[in-house]
Image (spheres, helix red, strand yellow):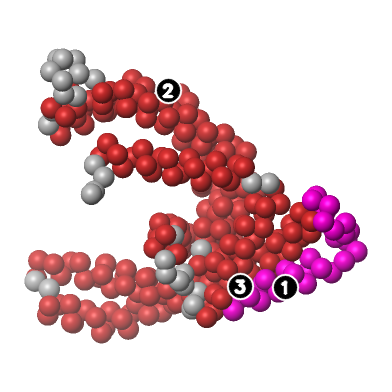
Amino acid sequence: CMLDRHQFGPWVVFGCTGLYTIYKGLSSNTATMLYGLSLSFFGGSFPVAIAVTEAFRVSGGDKVVACLTDINEDFQNLLKANAEDDKKDEDNDGNADVDQVDAKSLLSRKVRLFFVTVNPDRLMNAVGGLCQAFTGALAVAKLEFARTIALAVSISDNVQKPAALIITPVLARVLPVEYHKWIRPIVTTTCRLASMHIAWYIQRILSTIHSAMLGGLMVGRAFLRWLNDRKFMMVDPDRTMLDEALGWLIAFAGIYFQFSNNMRLPFPLNLILLPLSIIDYVLQWIITWQ
């Protein structure tokens, strides 16, 4: 049966909390190897998301974590208060009050609960810190993908005029007269989407190769450190080529895997990681046209 509104939210929170707990329980080398494998086999699918994440980590990762921790604390307090509010039966009729009010009253009740429970100063500082970090990360991404952005803009500027000559008469016949003012924005947006797709497809080819090499070497070096820590093999990474050999082997496997899938995620990963794919596409649009 379908989960109702009282059941779905806690399951989402439980899932996210569980994944975070698993991550915190991993050793540094294990986490690095998993991240490197992800880069090697899926890095070309999320070029901007990975670049922004790296910018977050390098330029202010500790501050971002502190902001997220503050938001999570308020969120946990809000969840606890919401659970208690859902159980209230102030008229003592045996039914929860939230089940006896209309949607408008329920919304008003929950909004009031939010303002009463959340610490406004902490929340505003945390949100402000995240916005500042996000803006800085986007600026770094713009510099990193400057050539891709320039290519997308150049293609769009050069195809808009011939595209308008072809598309405008067709739309003028199809659309009612009162909608003709939307023809120019439709042509512009279509050209931008097409040019962005072409430019970022080329970038994904480059990102696939780069991320596979970077991830493979990360795995190789982390694996040697893991072997040394567990006393399975005492090897000086500066005096051996084992980490590079393993890294390049994983890199070639990752490149082959991604190119064989046309740099797309196979099923069911395409469904599981759909939110991340949407985020990456939105970030591509933002840094290209904003």
**Is residue 212 located in the magenta-colored stretch of the structure?**
no
Reply yes or no: does residue 248 show up in magenta: yes
Q: Please give the range of residues in magenta.
A: 228-256
The amino acid type of the residue labelled 2 equals Asn
Residue labelled with disc 3:
254
Distance between mark 3 and mark 2 Cα atoms:
46 Å
Name the residue rendered at 87%, 66% in the picture. Answer: 240
Percent across and percent down for residue 34 are 62, 57
In the picture, the quarter occupied by the C terminus is bottom left
Q: Which mark is residue 137?
A: none
User: Toward the viewer: 119 or 59?
Assistant: 119
Is residue 63 rendered to the left or right of residue 93? right
3D distance between C-alphas at marks 1 and 3: 10 Å
Residue 274 visible, this orientation: yes
Q: Where in the figure is residue 118, as x and y percent of width and height?
A: 39, 24
Q: Residue at x 67, y 52 (%)?
A: 30
Residue 157 seen anywhere in this rendered image of the structure: no
Of badges 1 and 2, nearer the viewer stands 1
- Which residue was labeled with disc 1? 248
What is the three-letter code of the residue carrying label 3? Gly
Query: Of marks 1 and 3, which one's residue comes earlier in the chain?
Result: 1
Res. 266 image quadrant: bottom left
What residue is drawn where x is 64% and y is 46%? 26
Q: Amino acid at mark 1?
A: Trp
